[in-house]
Amino acid sequence: MARRWAELPQVVKTPGQILGRHGVGCEGTHGVFPKCNLACTPCYHSRDANQVRVDGAHTLTHVANQMGLLRRLRGPRAHAQLIGGEVSLLAPDDHAAALSLMRAAGREPMSFTHGDVDEEYLDRLVLGPDGRPRFGRLSFAAHFDKFMFGRRGIERPASEAALNPYRQRFAAMTRAVGRRHGVRFFLAHNMTVTPANLGEVAAVVRDCHAMGYGMFSFQPAAFVGDDRRWHESYRQATPDAVWAEIERGAGTALDYRTFENGDVRCNRTAYGFYVGDRWYPFLDGGDPRDLAVRDAFFRYLGGVSFTGTPAPVLAVKLMRVVLRHPRTVPVAVGWLVRTLGRVGIGRLLRNLRHMRPLTFVMHQFMDAAAVAPAWELMQRGETADDPRLLETQQRLAACHYAMAHPETGTLVPACVQHSVLDPAENAELRRLLPLDPVRRRPAGRSGSPTAVAAPAAPAALPVPTTAGAACGGGRCG
Ligand code: SF4
């Protein structure tokens, strides 16, 4: 974390910066299963991605290599996304094996899906060959928006509201599987925003916040990926406009400066919780006492990894901090009292069964037209004169979302992966893992061990043609 902090550009070394203080950022896979079976506009995949066969052996080889490099360069703990095309096109056993590889590398994995999966697939993912659960917890990011075509039952959604039963179905399905097998699920909800659904964002937040998702992440569309699928001018869906809509849905202002993940021009985050139908921030950014709590958190708990740490181990770690730094006790008690006061004891008691943490996120990828020249200059060690390219360089330097290239020993921002490196990587993968011969499943989509020909030997990823590295990947983040 110290190295991460030291390498951040000065512009993001703010009091609320999480990178280097409580984490090293998010990570994602690329080129490990580029294919998807829905069609989106926009789509961040390069045009060859859907011509690459899903191949479990290839996936596992490259997930292991990429995670190994991330562990070496980014340290022993981080969140990582199993992302690329559609994760449920992997056979359940391959999917499970990939998650295990990620955990073995100290990564807390999250699988990215369009959510059009069957409960049977989730059962087979959870249960090992001995019929017992192989995981205690699983995380999914499910992407739903009306620009995704081909979802079973709603091939061309007329509105975001029309998708709500499908959002509900996915959440209910994971709950049922979790109950059946004693597995905890964390769910994030992802949604691309363009001018065509900007006005529906607030309703999605209002209608869906209680479905069981612990995070709502919105991605204003960028001009990246397959240019055949850029069907609109996206400019009106600015970060400010999208954030205002999220606030309208949450019914309150959302302060994204209390905690920051990288550059706020890329990411905005508001951490908090719902009590009934009202959302409250964990910390009130307008209250200096709460800001002191944040500073104490970074100072005393910054190095403690919460996610994925077994409860008894976490309890011991927290106790150790308290014993070493007794002043943390009054700070925590003061925060608790203020927070209870903000919510109100009456509301709290009335909604004891309807309290849940929920984080709002906005992440905007950058346009390929800006990333490519900015990255090229960075590879030459040059700072751009052009203000737009300079901003791009600053955002890339503070990137929160890294992808690994073991063949060059480098990490690259996901923007660079999608804008610069994906096309050549996927073209090469298409050659190494051709689709034919393909046997289509007669019904259903998910869990496709029968959807591909016999697996080929693991393919080597192509060496990137640019000086940095190559990436592949998804549209979410
Ligand atoms: S992937 Fe791009 S938009 Fe996202 S944090 Fe990195 S530089 Fe910013």
Image: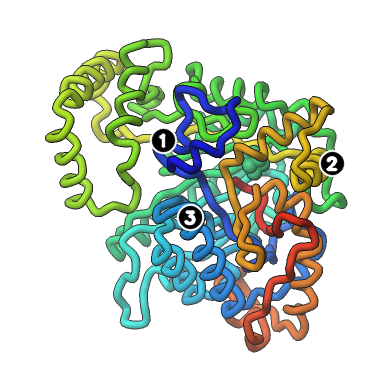
Secondary element at tag 1: loop
Q: Quadrant of residue 284?
A: top left
Cα gap from disc 2 to disc 1, whole angstroms: 32 Å
Residue visible at 35% across and 31% down in the picture: 298
Residue 424 position (above or below residue 93): above
Mark 1 residue type: Arg
| Residue in front for this viewpoint, 282 or 119 | 282
Q: Residue furthest bottom?
A: 454
> Which tag, 1 or 3, sits closer to the chain's start?
1
Residue visible at 56% across and 28% down in the picture: 12
Spot occupied by residue 180 in the image (x, y as percentages of width and height) = 30, 63
In which quadrant of this rendering is ligand 1 seen?
top right
Cα gap from disc 1 to disc 3, whole angstroms: 22 Å
> Which tag, 2 or 3, sits closer to the chain's start?
3
Spot occupied by residue 451 in the image (x, y as percentages of width and height) = 65, 79
Q: Which mark is residue 110?
A: 3
Secondary element at tag 2: helix
Q: How is the image coloured?
A: rainbow
Mark 2 residue type: Ala
Q: Quadrant of the N terminus?
A: top left
Residue visible at 18% across and 22% down in the picture: 333
Residue visible at 39% across and 23% down in the picture: 281
Q: Which mark is residue 21?
A: 1
According to the picture, the residue beneath numbered tag 2 turns out to be 369
Residue 173 visible in the displayed image? no
Q: Quadrant of residue 453?
A: bottom right
